[in-house]
Amino acid sequence: MLRQGLTVREAATRLGVNSQRVRALAKAGQLAAERGSREILIDPSAVERRAQQRPLPHRVLAPTNAWALLALAGQDRSITPSLDAVSPSARSRLRARIRDGSIADLVPLLRKRAEVRWLHADDADLEAIMAETGIVATGVSVADAYRFDIAAPGTMEFYAPAQLAAKLTRTYALEPSSRANVIMHVVSAPWPFAQELVRAPALVAAVDLADSPDQRTARAGRDYLAEHT
């Protein structure tokens, strides 16, 4: 089950700071938080926004290279359009990265592939959102299809190009929330998926899980990657 809100420790791990710093940010109102039954829960959308604002290590791959690496690693034709955006020499360097390390180890380098937004929608709109043309289901939304060890009933996760993401946000009044039931991965780079694809390949979906700030979700993704790559 995907828990709503992140623990202080999970938020600290995602931001690369200590727990004391997270508590200070929450107290100052710079991270939205609320008191749960046992502990403080931090708004995951606020954590993501802050994480995206901090400088990234120079070795994090540019979006086009991140998608090309996933295409090469998965050898999946449904994301081979990504390869057209990189040069042959870049492909050679990406293949070397794949040979030198596991995909699970490379997950942090792939974070610029999309911007993750944790949003809340009216429960009555979830089915309509997932039926929208142009989105690609991933993560917890394909857990049953790929037998990921995670369940998140009532939560939808998908990729959307930036223009469609803006339209969905307006149409369904999506807002950042600690009660997120929509996890939207917004792609600003060239769209990496084949036309008409509605479900992300297992490798991509597992990487999305492994990159989650929620520890149980991340573990499900890492376990799949360890077993299948």
Image: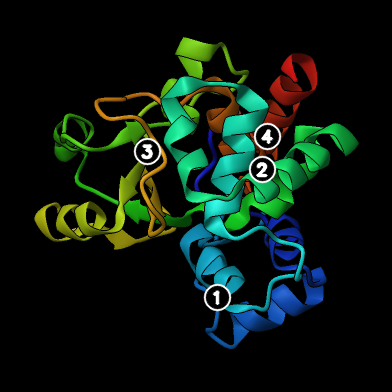
Question: Mark 1 = which residue?
Answer: 31
**Whole-Å distance between the Cαs marked 1 and 2?**
39 Å
Please name whichever residue, 105 or 184, is drawn nearer the observer in this view of the structure. Answer: 105
Please name whichever residue, 40 or 18, is drawn nearer the observer in this view of the structure. Answer: 18
The location of residue 220, given as percent across then percent down, is: 67, 26
Secondary structure type for disc 3: strand
Q: Quadrant of the C terminus?
A: top right
Q: Earlier in the sequence, mark 1 or mark 4?
A: 1
Question: Mark 4 = which residue?
Answer: 216
User: In which quadrant of the rendered view does residue 72 lie?
Assistant: top right
Question: Mark 3 = which residue?
Answer: 158
* Residue ID at (46%, 31%): 79
Query: Which amino acid type is marked by label 1?
Result: Leu
The location of residue 91, given as percent across then percent down, is: 66, 43
**Whole-Å distance between the Cαs marked 3 and 1?**
25 Å
Q: Earlier in the sequence, mark 3 or mark 1?
A: 1
* Residue ID at (56%, 11%): 147
Up the image or down, 154 lies above or below 117; here it is above
Q: Nearer the viewer, mark 3 or mark 1?
A: 3
Is 212 placed left or right of 137 in the picture? right
Query: Which amino acid type is marked by label 4?
Result: Arg
Is 178 placed left or right of 6 in the picture? left
